[in-house]
Image (cartoon, rainbow, N blue to C red):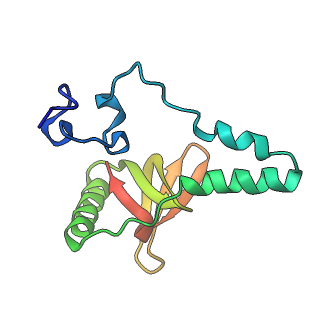
Amino acid sequence: MKIINPNAPDEYKYETDYHEIPREYLNPRIPQGRGIVKWNAFKTLLEQYEQLEQYIQDQNKIDRPSLSDDQLQRLNETLVFKMFNDPHINVRYFSNGYIKEKEGVIHKVDPYTQTLHLYENKGIDKLDLKDIVEIK
């Protein structure tokens, strides 16, 4: 069998569908394509424009990540450690289909409302504990 992608890692060497190969392993001289530009011709009416913008934004949304019990336990341990030793925290969390990031200082964790209160430059912000994906 002929090696199609000799410079790619072993799992991509014989792959024939370029959609399945990460961009960094493809030939950089191959053009990327038009992307979303092809939809601009349909933006003639205001309602169409708004609807197409919404479709484009919705394509990038993801489902809420589901964490295993081990991952939840590690998040909990990291949060407790940070509360008592180093209250400065960097949190990645899920919000409306996107993963966002906040940085601040832990004010408190409310077990009754399941929220984390953070001091930020603009004041105190609340995050639901169920939305937290990663703590650094």
- What residue is drawn where x is 53% and y is 62%? 126
Residue 46 image position (x, y, % from top left): 87, 51
- What residue is drawn where x is 66% and y is 40%? 38
Residue 15 image position (x, y, % from top left): 24, 42
Left or right of residue 47: residue 57: left
Give the residue at the far right of this rendering: 45
Give the residue at the far bottom of this rendering: 112
In the rendered view, tell whether residue 53 sits above or below residue 109. above
Give the residue at the far front of this rendering: 1
Left or right of residue 105: residue 14: left
- What residue is drawn where x is 34% and y is 55%? 134
In this view, the residue in front, 119 or 31, is 31
In the rendered view, tell whether residue 123 sits above or below residue 112. above
Quarter of the image for residue 17 reads top left
In the rendered view, tell whether residue 106 sits above or below residue 10. below
How many discs mark residues in the rendered view? Answer: 0
